[in-house]
Image (spheres, rainbow, N blue to C red):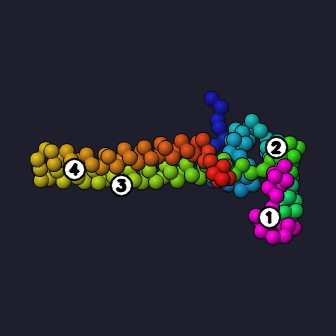
Amino acid sequence: MKRRAFWPPRRQAGNGYRDYDDGDLATLQRIKLLRKLDVPLEEIKAMLEGALTLGEGMRRHLVTLESRQKNLDTARQLCAELAKAPGLLAALDPETALAEVTRLEQKGVRFIDIQKTDRKKKAHGAWLSALVFIGLMAMVEGLMVWALTVDPVPLPVALLLAGWPLVFVAGALLALRQRLKEIRKGEEDAYRNY
């Protein structure tokens, strides 16, 4: 059986703490260094497992960084040209600027995909909000069930008390589902409303 370069650390029997030896620490420091250089985790894993040498991994990453640098230089030049324009944003001719961006993209320049990054952030917020709300409602539900066991009440009242938070949970899940559909398909651009 081939030993991997990085084993998950053992846990101590008494307290469950992880045991890291000097080799583990060195591996973690190597990973930290490469992540600070923005090397993707897949590349780091391949280097740790010996599928790539350090030199091969770094040469591959240099190609990626050089490509990003060219894209950033092009975006910076375009921003510098736009900065020369007098007046407000409303005076900018967006068709000409977007035509230039399209021309540059056809030459291989890659600009940041704002919709993709915005969509990710919005999806996380929607999930977090829904999970917090559901957690709070589950806690209220638990408290009510506990209260019903302490001091029994008539069955119809108990069902009402136990059931009303479920309505809010169902509403939260429906709202989450609707919001995720909107995020997936992309929200309509504001200019389409005019």
- Within 10 Å of disc 2 (Cα), the crowding (few <14, some 14-19, many 20+) is few
Vertical relation: 88 (above or below) 13: below
Q: In this view, which residue lies farthest toward the top?
A: 1
Q: In the rendering, at what x and y percent does residue 183 appear?
A: 57, 46
Read off the residue under disc 4: 161
Q: Image point 21% across, 50% down: which residue?
A: 161
First in sequence: mark 1 vs mark 2: 2
Nearer to the camera, 78 or 57: 78
Q: Amino acid at mark 2?
A: Arg
Q: In the rendering, at what x and y percent does residue 27 appear?
A: 67, 49
- Within 10 Å of disc 4 (Cα), the crowding (few <14, some 14-19, many 20+) is some
Q: Amino acid at mark 1?
A: Ala
* Magenta residues (range): 83-99
First in sequence: mark 3 vs mark 2: 2
Badge 3 vs badge 2, beta-carbon distance below 8 Å: no
- Within 10 Å of disc 1 (Cα), the crowding (few <14, some 14-19, many 20+) is few
Tell which tag, 3 or 1, sits nearer the viewer.
1
Q: Amino acid at mark 3?
A: Leu
Tell which tag, 4 or 3, sits nearer the viewer.
4
Q: Label 1: state its secondary structure.
A: helix
Tell which tag, 3 or 2, sits nearer the viewer.
3
Give me the C-alpha separation between circle 4 and circle 3.
15 Å
Read off the residue under disc 3: 136
Which labelled disc corresponds to residue 60?
A: 2
Give me the C-alpha separation between circle 1 and circle 2.
43 Å
Give me the C-alpha separation between circle 1 and circle 4.
60 Å
- Within 10 Å of disc 3 (Cα), the crowding (few <14, some 14-19, many 20+) is some
Q: Image point 84% across, 49% down: which residue?
A: 99
Q: Label 4: state its secondary structure.
A: helix
